[in-house]
Image: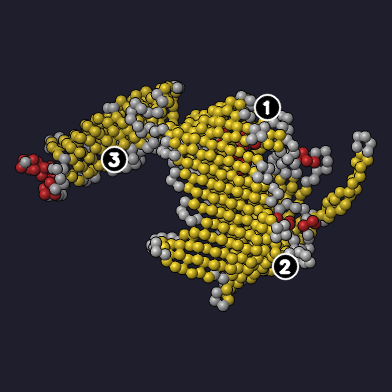
Amino acid sequence: MKTFIQKLFVFGLVVGISTTATELLSAGADRLNFKKIDKSTNCDIQADSSEYQFDTDWAMLKGNVAIKYGDIELRADTVRFNRVTGDAEAQGNVAFFSTTGDVWRGDSLKVNVFSGLAVSSKFDFYSDPVRVIADKGSVYTDENKNKEYMLDNAIVTTCTNAPGHFHYQVKTKRLCLRPEDEFVAQGAVPYLFGVPFFYWPYYWKDLNRHYGFRFEPGYGSDWGAFLLSSYKMVIYRNKESNTYVDSKTSIDFRSKRGFAFGEKILWNSNDKLTGWISAYYLDDKDLPYNVEDPERYRIRLNNEWEIAPRDRILAQAIYVSDDRFMEDFFEEEYDEMNQPDNFLSWTHIGDTYSGGVLARMRLNDFYTQVERLPEAWYNLNSTELFQSGIYFENNSTMSFLNKQFDERIWLGKEDPSYDVFRVDSDFVLTRPMKLMGFLSVVPRVGYRGTYYDKTKIVEEKIVTTTAEDGTVDSKTEKVAVEEDADFRNVFELGAELSFKAFSTWQDNQGFTWRHVVEPYTDITLIPEPNLLPEQIYQFDEVDEIEESNTVRFGVRNRWQYKANNPQASVRELLYIDLYADFNLDATGEEDEFESLNLDLRFQPISWMKLYVEGEYEQEKSEVSEALFRLSVWHDAFKANVFYRYLVDESSLVSGVLTWNINPEWAASIYGRYEYETSRVEEVGTWIQRKFDCLAYRVYLTYEPSYTHLDGREEEEDFKVSFVLWLTGFEPDNLRELDDR
């Protein structure tokens, strides 16, 4: 024992360890901690025991060996280590890893700790989400601390279960692996549940983004048996500038509709320039109602460009062959936007203002749309004038407007489309003040000036038509007659009065509560403008302004709470805004009371939210519109219930429930029902199974038959499809039909 301590003492002197023999022995079980064995290497060593060869600079380290250098760490049962060159020969339970999370395990390893170059026999390597098992290989670390592994007879997988039981794996003859970046395989054969299903002489895989093949097979009553397939690849990539250009090629087959082909080019430049352009085409074998040309297609562009921190350019263009195309092949997208919106805009955001230019156009002549070719706008935020306490704001637009109507409506008749050049500017002055120390009063005065390069008058015209049998029919119609340019003046006076009252209290659970009540009144007086809506070509709400003298009485309630903790934030349990509008111009039998409105937000617990808004119209004695949205989420499930009511138009309820049954199984069910037509619009479900590294999901949707308002019959439609993916590389869109 004495000799062993002497050897340790001598070794400590040589490597520069400044610690006492007592400290060394107190590490427990004769465990040694050799720190900074060479100042130039900044290397730390731990071992239960060691023997140092003075003539060769080699040390034999035994028992729980750990060598650390920078972000590299080597662990093993025994290590033969050269402190001068950094060479190490590790044996038994070898683990070679970095602070980035990469782990290389094997029975033996030759490595240079200083350079990161390593050569190993059979090993097991893991770098989230990839695991590699190989017969032999080497690793190199460059000056930028990037690692590259060259491996022979390797197995690549994202599975974490025991070797020989992988659900998915790729066997390769030669593998080049760059952790957290990519791998390139030669002679690659994928295996699914132990069954080989393809051979690639050359196979490349990005470890950060989803590339490669994807498939979605299924069956639909409208499509027949179908297979949606795509291949995504890199066209250009620059890691340093975070720039890439990708290509996604789609080949789809539907037994009732035929083959379809799609191409999508995606780009991203450091998140400053992002977007895509895509085209999708098929020669349809089963044309729907009112579609004559079998060549059906969609061309789409979407781009966002941050040209400066405060400047952004947006572009979107969608051109389709017919108005049924989106509904037939991209129904989810159609439900969100049944009419394409095509625009090009530039926006600048200043400290106190914003402005920009917008061009909105109609690309398909079978839609009714307002074109803005172009429209320039400027908004000045509420700004104090010369520290006077008076605030000024302005919203201005200059627009070339053109309302285009669906040509199918007027085909063979006179084109009802019209266009106007309009300049509109809205000015508002406010003077916030406090009265009696509690009453907030904000009077305002506003002026809106609008120039129209043409106006109109409505005249009655006798229209005579002759039928095929010679019958002559005459009727009176109202027609618009174009008038000269004019300027509309709109004046506004108003004031908002409000005050806040609140009370606070503490409960026995350690929470402080606060109830805030804010009654308010808003008076708005707008005299009759010199131009009425019927004298103006209608495009939007700007052209609808007319005389309006109203007063709004309302009260806001807030229930808030906060834990008795200095770092806790205030949370809002309940917010209610209830207000009523009264018409001051009501005469005779007219009721001054116009409507009662509700805006409610309720979050009783962290995982539940309720939102309600609605309007009750006194004149009709009915609820004119209502919106209800409930969201509930927890560890195992999430649910959303939505209800929208528009009087005489729609009474739609929809809901979705997703349940994570256990780590392996999950399911979801959803549906939409329209009370106005007593129609189940859609019901659907999916069920999901996760394995160690694989997951699949089965979708089922059903749409019952129904009749359109124009009498057109729609047959029932159902679809079932199957999606499979690697859990380590889950794509942005699971379903192929959502990404074309």
Q: Provide the residue designation for mark 3.
A: 72
Amino acid on which disc 1 is placed: Asp
- First in residue order: circle 2 vs circle 1: 1
Would residue 30 appear left or right of 378 to someone viewing this image?
left
Amino acid on which disc 2 is placed: Leu
Q: Is residue 86 visible?
A: yes
Percent from the top left, x then y, of residue 609?
51, 53
How many angstroms separate mark 1 from mark 3 (CA)? 63 Å
Q: Residues within 10 Å of mark 1 (few under 14, many from 20)?
A: few
Q: Is residue 430 visible?
A: no
- First in residue order: circle 3 vs circle 2: 3
What residue is drawn where x is 70% and y is 58%? 621
**On residue 427, which mark appears?**
none
Q: Provide the residue designation for mark 2.
A: 584
Q: Provide the residue designation for mark 1.
A: 286
What residue is drawn where x is 83% and y is 55%? 457
| SS for dot 2 | loop
Quarter where residue 297 is shown: top right
| SS for dot 3 | strand
